[in-house]
Image (cartoon, rainbow, N blue to C red):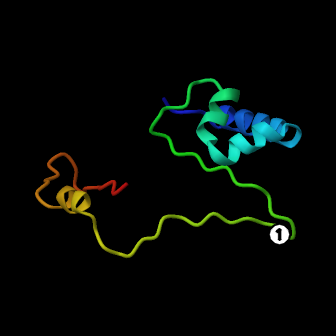
Amino acid sequence: MKWSQEELNKAASEINRRASADADFRKLCLEKPAEALRMVSSPEVPDNVQINIIESASGYDYRIVLPDYDDGELSDETISKIAGGICATHNYCTLDLH
C-alpha cells in the first residue's frame, strides 16, 4: 500500500507531537521507528518498509539526507533490462532504470 503525502505528513506531525511530550514514546521512535509509526498511523505500515527516525541534534540548523551511493556500475537487473529488448511500437524507446 502506498501512502499519500498528506498521510505521511499527518503521521510525522503526530510522531513529533507525541515524542516531544512522552519520553517512552520518544525512546520507541529511536529504537523501533516502524512500531512507533504503526501506533500513530493509518493505513498500516507494511513490514518491508524501512523507517528511520532521528533525534534533533542541538547546534545544527539543517539536516541533509544523502541519497544512495551510485558508483556508476550497472546492476545485473539493469543490464538485463537493457540487453535483449526491442521497441516495435515507437520510433524511440525509453527505459526506466529505477
Spot occupied by residue 70 in the image (x, y as percentages of width and height): 42, 71
Above or below, 13 against 67 in this view is: above
Q: In the shown orientation, is residue 42 left or right of residue 59?
A: left
Viewer-side residue, 39 vs 88: 39
Spot occupied by residue 2 in the image (x, y as percentages of width and height): 51, 33
What residue is at 83 percent from the left and 69 percent from the top?
Answer: 60
For mark 1, give the secondary structure: loop
Query: Which residue, as the protein is rendered here, is positioned at the far left?
Result: 84
The amino acid at mark 1 is: Tyr
In which quadrant is the C terminus drawn?
bottom left
Viewer-side residue, 33 vs 27: 27
Find disc 1 in the rendering and name its residue: 60
Location of residue 94 by image quarter = bottom left
What residue is at 70 percent from the left and 43 percent from the top?
Answer: 29
Viewer-side residue, 97 vs 94: 97
What residue is at 74 percent from the left and 44 percent from the top?
Answer: 27
Location of residue 21 by image quarter = top right
Number of other residues with Cα within 10 Å of mark 1, as a class: few under 14, some 14 to 19, many 20 or more: few
Spot occupied by residue 86 in the image (x, y as percentages of width and height): 13, 53
Spot occupied by residue 33 in the image (x, y as percentages of width and height): 63, 42
What residue is at 25 percent from the left and 56 percent from the top?
Answer: 93
Q: How many labels does the image show?
A: 1
